[in-house]
Amino acid sequence: MRPERHGGFTLLEVLVALAVAVYGMLSITLAAITAGSNATSLREQSLAHWVAMNQAAELRLAENWPATGISDGDVDFAGMQWRWNTEISETDVEALRRAEIAVAYAEEPDREIARVVAFVSQPTPGIQFRPWVGQPSNRRGRNQ
């Protein structure tokens, strides 16, 4: 007489299926953690780059040509404290100076997040930029 066999899975088949499911869930979790970490890193790099570009714009719009040497400062941007460090050096072109701007967190000044190189031309005599005060002009003729 043959032993009666019931339909179903063996213990080994269940364990293999469970192992595959756990591996899949771990892969998905790792991907989510990596995506979150990358988003945070990209955000801080973007903000630090903006800080550096703002510093470059300030150098270009300054009334006086920047002196060669190293300067640094702190700035509050996007609700965070940043430390910038600028090294101004001469170039082969007499009317141009090279500004290398590094940005880090104010609490961690040794951990550089972004670096920008900008060139600053010698100011043209008689040309001055007026500081912006107020609302943008209504160029399309619409009422505000």
Image (tube, rainbow, N blue to C red):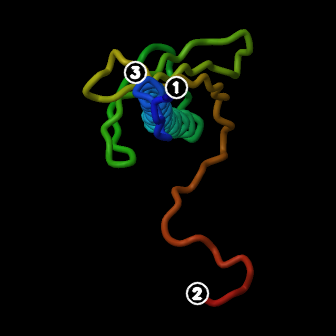
What residue is pinned by disc 1?
A: 66
Looking at the image, which residue is at 59% across and 36% down?
A: 60
The tag earlier along the polypeptide, 2 or 3, is: 3
Most foreground residue, 65 or 69: 69
The local secondary structure at tag 1 comes to: loop
* Circle 2: residue type: Gln
Q: Quadrant of residue 33?
A: top left
The local secondary structure at tag 2 comes to: loop
Residue 76 shows in the view: yes
Q: Give the spatial CA distance, label 1 vs label 3.
A: 10 Å
Looking at the image, which residue is at 74% across and 15% down?
A: 93
From the viewer's perspective, is 80 left or right of 122?
Answer: left
In the image, residue 29 lies at what x, y percent? Answer: 43, 35
| Callout 2 crowding tier (Cα within 10 Å): few <14, some 14–19, many ≥20 | few
Looking at the image, which residue is at 59% across and 51% down?
A: 129
Q: Give the spatial CA distance, label 2 vs label 3.
A: 43 Å
Q: Which residue is situated farthest in the front direction here? A: 1
| Callout 3 crowding tier (Cα within 10 Å): few <14, some 14–19, many ≥20 | few
From the viewer's perspective, is 23 left or right of 136?
Answer: left
Residue 41 shows in the view: no
Most foreground residue, 125 or 9: 9
* Circle 1: residue type: Pro
What residue is pinned by disc 2?
A: 144
What residue is pinned by disc 3?
A: 71
In the image, residue 136 lies at what x, y percent? Answer: 59, 70
The tag earlier along the polypeptide, 1 or 3, is: 1
Q: Which residue is situated farthest in the bottom direction here? A: 143
In the image, residue 110 lies at what x, y percent? Answer: 34, 15
Task: State if disc 1 and disc 2 touch (CB < 8 Å).
Answer: no
From the viewer's perspective, is 97 left or right of 48?
Answer: right
Q: Which residue is situated farthest in the left direction here? A: 107
